[in-house]
Image (cartoon, grey):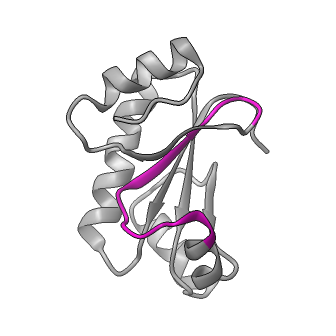
């Protein structure tokens, strides 16, 4: 349940560097944006045991860590066509930015502007 502005980001167990880097980047962002939630979603059809094993092996926090129940359908619905996609929502779950990239240069500045203005920004 979304109760404050959040970044929803995605990762794949097929890309070790991507899931490590995305979680490490989010840890940095958490310290800079404590007023936000960060929701992590695994996009694979792995069983729960494999998914939980990765999370455990890297000591990723389990709070707000999820996986798709039906990966193919969810990826199509949310248009997750590349793994660095992130969706930014406000505290009511309204999408403020449908296609952000946490690794993009200037992302933090865009996020600050977005949180201040509370409306859609696409750059």
In the picture, measured across the screen, residue 75 lies left or right of residue 58, that is: right
> Quarter holding the N terminus?
top right
Left or right? Give the position of 58 relative to 87: left
Q: Position of residue 22 (x, y in %)?
A: 35, 53
Is 74 above or below relative to 113? below
Identity of the residue drawn at 35% across and 63% down: 19
Q: Is residue 32 above or below residue 5?
A: above
Residue stretch rendered in magenta on the structure = 77-92
Residue 112 highlighted magenta (yes or no): no
Q: Nearer the viewer, residue 1 or 62?
A: 1
* Image quadrant where residue 77 sits: bottom right
Which residue lies at the image location 39% right of the left edge and 51% below the top edge? 23
Whether 78 is among the magenta residues is: yes
Q: Residue at x 32, y 20 (%)?
A: 109
Residue at the extreme left of the image, as rendered? 105
* Left or right relative to 2: residue 35: left
Would you place residue 46 above or below residue 107 in this image?
below
Which of the 4 quarters of the picture holds residue 16?
bottom left
Q: Report the quarter where the C terminus lies.
A: top left
Residue lying furthest top = 116
Where residue 7 appears, as percent x and y from the top left, is 53, 41
Residues 101 and 46: in front is 101
Q: What count of labels does the image hold?
A: 0
Residue 76 location, x and y as percent? 57, 75
Percent across and percent down for residue 57 are 41, 68
Lateral position of residue 23 relative to residue 66, left or right: left
Residue drawn at the location 36% of the way across and 25% of the way down: 110
């Amino acid at each position: 349940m979304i109760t404050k502005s959040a970044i929803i980001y995605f990762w794949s167990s097929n890309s070790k560097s991507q899931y490590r880097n995305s979680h490490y980047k989010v840890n940095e962002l958490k310290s800079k944006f404590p007023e936000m939630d960060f929701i992590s979603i695994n996009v694979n059809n792995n069983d729960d045991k494999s998914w939980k094993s990765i999370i455990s092996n890297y000591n990723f926090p389990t709070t707000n860590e999820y996986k798709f129940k039906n990966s193919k359908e969810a990826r199509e619905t949310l248009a997750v066509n590349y793994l660095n996609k992130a969706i930014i929502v406000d505290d009511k779950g309204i999408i403020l930015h449908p296609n952000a990239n946490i690794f993009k240069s200037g992302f933090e500045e865009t996020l600050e502007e977005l949180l201040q203005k509370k409306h859609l920004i696409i750059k």
